[in-house]
Amino acid sequence: MRILVPALAVVVLALLPLAGVGVLGWTGLFGAAVPYAAAALFLGGVVAKVLTWARAPVPFRIPTTCGQQRSLPWIRPARLENPSSTWGVLGRMALEVLAFRSLFRNTRTRLVGGHLSYPSTKWLWAAGLAFHYAFLVVLLRHLRFFTEPVPAFVAALAHLDGFLLIGLPEVYASTLVLVGALAFLFLRRVASPPLRYLSLPADYFALFLLLGIGLSGAWLRHLAKIDVPAVKGAVMGLLHLSPRPPAGAGASFYVHLFLVCTLLAYFPFSKLMHMAGVFLSPTRNLAANSRAIRHVNPWNHPVPVHTYAEYEDEFRARMRDAKIPVEKEA
Amino acid sequence: MPGAPDAGPVLAAQPAPKAEPRLKPDQMEYYHPEELLQVDYDRLPEKDWMSEPPDIRPGNFIHPTKPKNLEALGFPYPRDWAPLDPDWKLPADWKEIVFKGMRDRLEKYRSFRVFMDVCVRCGACADKCHFYVGGGDPKNMPVLRAELLRSVYRNDFTAAGKVLGRLAGARPLTPEVIKEWFLYFYQCTECRRCSVFCPYGIDTAEITMMARELLHELGIGVNWIMQPVAACDRTGNHLGIQPHGLKDTLEFFADDIEEVTGVRVEVPINKKGAEVLFVTPSGDFLADPGIYTCMGYMALFHEIGLDYTFSTYASEGGNFGLFTSADTMKRLNAKIYAEAKRLGVKWILGGECGHMWRVIHQYMDTMNGPADFLEVPVSPVTGTRFEHARSTKMIHVIELLADLVHHGKLKLDPSRNDGRRVTFHDSCNPARGLGMLEEPREVLRAVCRNFFEMPRNTIREQTFCCGGGAGLGTEENMEVRLRGGLPRGNAVRHVQERHGVNRLAAMCAIDRATLATVCDFWAPGVKLTGITELVANALVMKGENERALDFRKEPMRAGAGEASHA
């Protein structure tokens, strides 16, 4: 159920525009209204979420330290794993965001014959990194639909991405990596019993939706051989607030577009917000220097404290008998 | 029915241990290593975790707080209740209390908000928890532990949860959920190992702290934590040692030190105008083998001529408030600065403790500072200024020692420790809350010649918890502790077999107590020691006698040379 329901949901989402455009011809709805609504939800939702996070204070400085602290001058501090300066924090965050540092540490627990071992395992790291970078390349490549003239780097990127020189138009490596990585991440979730147990429908939904986007995109390029200038015209029209549906794009284009719109609309309300959240994680984005520089908690309210005077009042006689110095004699 | 075989599943998915006659689930002997080792991570309950009720049974939960301790602290809803009872006597508006508590904390902690929202359930954390490794209960996977709370958050605080319900991973708050929280947020030692591996740094300690605060709002807590908290509030330390009792204890230690070294050390207590206030966990005053570490401090401070004082009012370095609520932590911690001010000391020195140092390093200055009435700590022996503590004005005794050792200011005879084949357990908080990794190693290498590291993925920032931190170090949850102690015990066993290790050094009072049990169970023959105890063994004191005995009154060189071929 946890897998079937999200799978069906993505299939239904793909069928909606097929029916809506292919049968009913609602290009205005799927070619303009939905994209605008999705973009608004995405922008509004992401901004609202980030603001909610940012508005919440960081009362305590709680970095997870993953290396030697800066203490005595002859002991080498781990500047990135346990940063004590802003530069160190920037480095740590850059490693985390660009190279998935923490996932790189991953180990797999093995209990064999009463002996535990924790061999390194890099599959999740590799597949995660592959998916994210492939997705980035795909996004950048799509800039050719959004810009006029197309920036040189976008064309160069598309050229590089097509280095395999298979098919016409040539298959982009990023397409293969994207779909392959997503498939791996799905199989990994299903193949490992503990991971399957902890996975929610939402986890599969995100994977299926992204797969749907990737596959429908590949379909457009390689099988439908979509009219690129026409699509670009439509996209530019949307950007300039004068939507005009692409002539003869076919319903399959709307499938791709609708799935992308679903992703945009769904994004701010889902775990996909980890994209923004990773920057705001207090265990990673703070310097571990709280003994050197005082961290201020904006809501540091007073609490009841059992004072020394109250303490001495209770124990004064015994303290005096034991010749422990006291403040008051009586 | 003591020792009756338990029909229910143990930790949800694993086979139940066979009961020994006359033994009870709170005794180590009730369990057998071979049985606890029958963990199969791929054996999972049939039902979805949301439909799986919590399995609360003797051996896996901690007794609730006695009403008198809640009353003493002014906590709400003190009452008699038992985890095994179907009815926990929740207050009438308990749901509202929980929701309000969550709302408040979501507004006060960015960590809580972000950690509720961003988890992708990638599973990197899943097998990083010692309780999961040793027990196989899926709800001990850090991700699922957090989902216990997150599912309620989604249901009542997020649009997706309200619209999609269970499909979005949301579930309504029920009394069963409260029971589940009680069980599993007291099966987390806030060790933060999972946080090291999480791509977003989600820290289960933070989530456990929030969950425990919410439970406290319903009058639900555990006595093993709240009794020490109440005692600490009143007497200044968790154990409830009163001022005259503390003085007697320390005088005893001085007598013992004199007996084995021939040197009489001073016992400064509540001494105004001392340069340094020394604060250590109260376990060092009472618990074997912590007391030998305390003797070690006293011998060391005497030898270097440190002008210091103990305090009876601030006689606790540890802080069980950390395991209760931020306010309680602040309340107990406030005494340290208050006492430093009253006594007019220049700076503060702290003893060997784990969670104490998380509080000192990451919370104290923020909560109870600024300590502008103190001076930056300076070693009176070497003149080193401890700049890294220039705001908090408090350093760790191992930092002081590392500096002394580095400058060759201690006369040491490491051969006295030759019979002790030592490995070092990085305590969770010094490792993942400070990063105090090299200082203890520098000191250990200087004072003992047989030092062996445990395997790489079990030390430093990847160290495994003792299984008894964050207020779990009691006996009624013995099965949880032994299972949670497996990864550490297994690594100790490894160096025991390979290098003949017989001493596990730990700079943490809870470790010295709880790892003793873990070692007896998983690596029998290995004994616990503090670092300063080993230092004091090697320390050649001015005017000392021939050191035939150590502070344990065992032959100083027993076993030296025996295991060197191992």
Image (cartoon, rainbow, N blue to C red):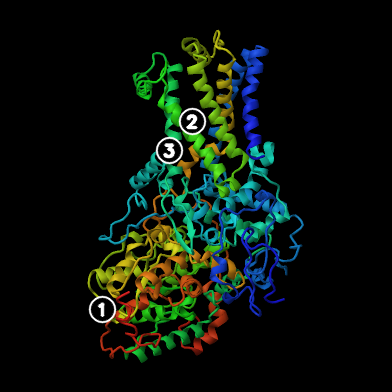
Q: Who comes first in sequence, dot 2 or dot 3?
A: 3
Please tell me which residue is depicted at 47% across the width and 68% down the height of the picture.
B489
Mark 1 vs mark 3, CA separation in Å: 51 Å
Circle number at residue B530: none
Camera-nearest label, 1 or 3: 3
Please tell me which residue is depicted at 63% across the width and 19% down the height of the picture.
A17
The reply to whether residue B120 is in sight is no
The amino acid on which the numbered mark 3 sits, given as a three-letter code, is Leu
Q: Secondary structure at mark 1?
A: loop
Depth check: B251 or B489 in front?
B489
Which residue is disc 3 drawn over? A129
Do marks 1 and 3 both belong to one polypeptide chain? no
The reply to whether residue B44 is in sight is yes
The quadrant the C terminus of chain B occupies is bottom left
Marks 1/3 in contact by CB < 8 Å: the verdict is no
Image spot of residue B267 (x, y percent): 39, 84
Image spot of residue B523 (x, y percent): 46, 72
Where is B15 relative to B164, above or below?
below
Circle number at residue A179: 2
Circle number at residue B412: 1
User: Would you say A320 lies left or right of B221 here?
Assistant: left
Mark 2 vs mark 3, CA separation in Å: 13 Å
